[in-house]
Image (cartoon, rainbow, N blue to C red):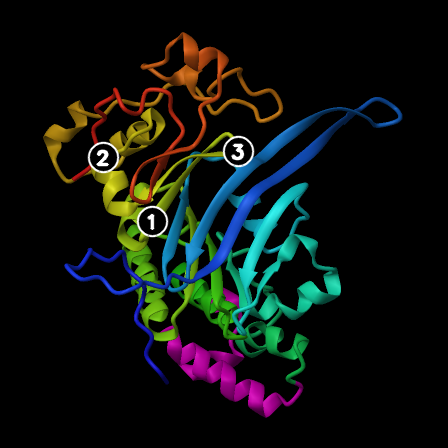
């Protein structure tokens, strides 16, 4: 197997050569609105803007973290990319294996099905995402069967290879999900996601249902698989300590919008948005004195059906001004690979996490 190193952010050379960056995914103005219907005739009286004009990209071989509080639109964004739910509007440009870029949102269901093997998802709950009536051979081999691999012996050999790849013994093929621990079940889910040799894997909170010690094992496994198979990850999470461990870049979501994107190092050292800084203050650190520095974020995420005027974060923001109440800030570039949606980004000195 050819080794493909993971793409990291590169430091400038004295005589830099022309650098070609390959975007495997680019999302432009993605929207997903759910209608609010009331009355006998189910008349539409409003909309829930779960995803509202989201823009980001992922380069081949990197991991982009999508982070935010529960209800901010992370999972909806991920499912829109896979067309598990149909976006209301926007473009989802995906690079096929032949380097051709296609807009997934404009494809028919038949054409979209041909690309399913290139994009797979790892779900949050390993207990509910596995059919308890199917053994491992059928669970991991099902994507191959659906995509035309009818020979049971060949499927069995491929499943054995995948189980070894995720650290499980091939002899487990005849066992059922109930015989495995939570961490082992998540390894099975990962093996199933890799069955069709995907190029993009969307991991939707893949370790949130696991114990901390098991979380580290699964995260390290994902990183090893990325190095070995040249995978690209969109990693959805609300735990910033997990994001810091695995991601190259991070996009922060709030109430259906991207409010800040940066490399992981820049975001943790110099956050530019008060919401990002508030999330940072909640990251646990092994220092008894650090608890006095924590500033809990008061209030709740506003309803996407009725967001506040101006900046959506202003009701919870300690730095809000009159301008924040009336005008939504544009997402602006403040440095290389660092974008923020805040009127006062150049004034505030916000604390990060070392």
Task: Check disc 2 and report its element: helix, strand or loop.
Answer: loop
Task: Check disc 1 and report its element: helix, strand or loop.
Answer: strand
Highlighted range, magenta: 150-179
Q: Is residue 265 left or right of residue 159?
A: left
Q: Is residue 198 visible?
A: yes
Residue nearer the viewer, 66 or 266: 266
Q: Residue at x 16, y 23 (%)?
A: 292
Looking at the rendering, which quadrant does residue 49 occupy? top right
- Who comes first in sequence, dot 3 or dot 2? 3
- Residue 118 spot, x, y in % from top left: 55, 68
| Residue underneath mark 2 | 270
Task: Please tell me whether residue 3 is drawn above or below residue 300 in the rendered image.
Answer: below
Residue 249 numbered mark, or none: 1
Residue 256 numbered mark, or none: 3
Count of numbered marks: 3
Q: Quadrant of the C terminus?
A: top left
Could you classify mark 2 by the number of other residues whose Cα lies within 10 Å: few (under 14), some (14-19), or many (20 or more)?
A: some
Could you classify mark 1 by the number of other residues whose Cα lies within 10 Å: few (under 14), some (14-19), or many (20 or more)?
A: many
């Amino acid at each position: 197997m050819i080794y493909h190193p993971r793409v990291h952010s590169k430091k400038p050379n004295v005589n830099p050569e022309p650098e070609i960056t390959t975007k495997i995914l680019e999302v432009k103005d993605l929207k997903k609105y759910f209608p609010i219907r009331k009355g006998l005739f189910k008349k539409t009286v409003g909309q829930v803007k779960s995803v509202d004009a989201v823009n980001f990209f992922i380069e081949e071989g990197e991991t982009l973290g999508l982070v935010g509080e529960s209800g901010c639109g992370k999972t909806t964004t991920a499912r829109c990319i896979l067309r598990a739910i149909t976006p209301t509007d926007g473009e989802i440009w995906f690079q096929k294996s032949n380097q051709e870029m296609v807009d997934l949102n404009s494809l028919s269901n038949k054409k979209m099905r041909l690309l399913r093997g290139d994009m797979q998802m790892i779900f949050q709950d390993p207990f509910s995402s596995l059919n308890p009536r199917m053994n491992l051979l059928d669970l991991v081999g099902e994507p191959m069967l659906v995509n035309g691999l009818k020979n049971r012996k060949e499927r069995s050999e491929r499943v054995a290879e995948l189980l070894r790849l995720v650290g499980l013994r091939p002899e487990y093929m005849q066992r059922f999900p109930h015989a495995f621990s939570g961490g082992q079940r998540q390894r099975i889910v990962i093996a199933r996601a890799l069955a069709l040799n995907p190029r993009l894997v969307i991991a939707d909170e893949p370790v949130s249902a696991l114990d901390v010690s098991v979380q580290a094992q699964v995260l390290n496994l994902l990183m090893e698989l990325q190095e070995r198979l040249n995978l690209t990850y969109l990693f959805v999470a609300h735990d910033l300590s997990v994001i810091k461990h695995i991601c190259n870049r991070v996009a922060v979501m709030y109430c259906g919008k991207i409010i800040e994107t940066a490399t992981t190092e820049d975001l943790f050292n110099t956050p530019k948005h008060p919401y990002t800084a508030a999330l940072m203050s909640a990251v646990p650190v092994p220092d008894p004195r650090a608890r006095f520095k924590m500033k809990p974020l008061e209030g709740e995420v506003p309803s996407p059906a009725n967001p506040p005027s101006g900046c959506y974060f202003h009701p919870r923001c300690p730095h809000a001004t009159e301008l924040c109440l009336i005008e939504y800030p544009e997402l602006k570039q403040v440095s290389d690979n660092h974008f923020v949606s805040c009127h006062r980004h150049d004034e505030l000195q916000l604390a990060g996490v070392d």
